[in-house]
Amino acid sequence: MSGEVALTLAASGHSCADPRHLGFEAGPAMQFPAGWALIEHPVQGAILFDCGYGPSARAAMRGGLRWIYRRAIHACSSAHTDAGQLLRQRGIDAEEVRMVVISHFHPDHIGGLDQFRRARFVAHADAWNQLRELSWFGLLHAQIWKELLPDDFAERLQLLDEHGRRPLPVDWSGLGEGWDLFGDGSLHVVALPGHARGQIGLAVRTGDGERVVLAADAFWRREQLDRDRPLPWLTQRLAMDDAAAYLDTVRRLARFRDSHPGAWVIPSHCADTLAAWRQRHPSAVLDEAAGEDDAPAQEAVAS
């Protein structure tokens, strides 16, 4: 591993949705990669931001109410695109992953946690408290699947709360306050409320000087940063924890992008942003295209 922070974008599985659900004109279904990221830190080692779908998510989606979720969003996942499999292409074993930063507890972000048996987990206290306190029906409505968490998850969990928030450095001006993850200025966690309770993103300064905000589900398509408008009513009801906070977060990210030319704001599910990153950094993407030659698809789950 080099002496600088390296960032690789990745995707494990995907889903589809009607563009009208995001406020766009009617048209073909949009595909949304289940994105995550690998951060290679010179001291801390291999760090993940989320992990996409994985073995436990596939098992859950085979029956019961989880099957309805799969059908509703046409979720698709297969073993050759699991995070652990894709990491092996980089010479990184799942046992070497030191930390997984969890943006929020939806299945397309934590569906592969069971692959990382030695990793510590980082999440916002609000997200964790919601998971612990909601009723069965509340968890269903919030799209939180507790069965995707490893049995020893709580013992490996580090929580972020309001007491640890500090103003971010000038490089990240406009994002507000956050948490310096390692105390070295390389990775800052930022709060991105709206879509999910306690949702967080990660601000990364790479070794080549690029500023990247991994924005999770603060928005889904890059066009939404230029569309200062609420989501359709039904989407607000089904996919939002706080619709007003969602709009505030999108506006904050748009202002950051506009005031920092060259900076990247990367949502987890935007195929166009992933393609643009691949064009700029051809060797810094791990996804289905990268994994096709590695192993045949197994345990595929599709609509």
Image (cartoon, rainbow, N blue to C red):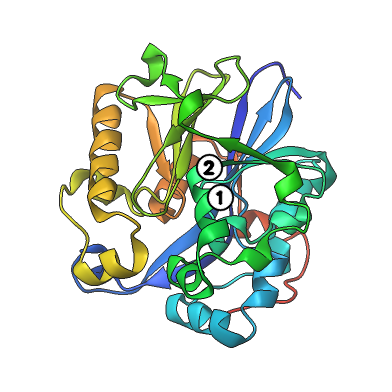
Identify which residue is drawn at 39% across, 51% down.
Answer: 272
Check disc 1 and report the residue beneath it: 128
Q: Nearer the viewer, residue 128 or 48?
A: 128
Q: Secondary structure at mark 2?
A: helix
Question: Which of these two is toward me, 96 or 64?
Answer: 64
Residue 180's image quarter? top right
Local packing at callout 1 (Cα closer than 10 Å; few below 14, some 14-19, many 20+) is some
Tell me whether circle 2 and circle 1 mark residues in contact (CB < 8 Å): yes
| Element under disc 1 | helix
Q: Is residue 267 left or right of residue 187?
A: left
Q: Amino acid at mark 1?
A: Trp
In this view, the residue farthest toward the bottom is 64
Residue type at mark 2: give it. Answer: Ala
Which residue does the image show at 53% across and 35% down from the upper left? 281
Query: Does 78 appear above or below 223?
Result: below
Q: Above or below — where is 131 with respect to 198?
A: below
The residue pinned by badge 2 equals 125
Q: Residue 110: x, y in percent?
A: 61, 56
**Residue 44 in view (yes/no):** yes
Q: Position of residue 231 (x, y in %)?
A: 22, 60
Q: Is residue 216 left or right of residue 235?
A: right
For the point 78% across and 64% down, which residue is it?
295
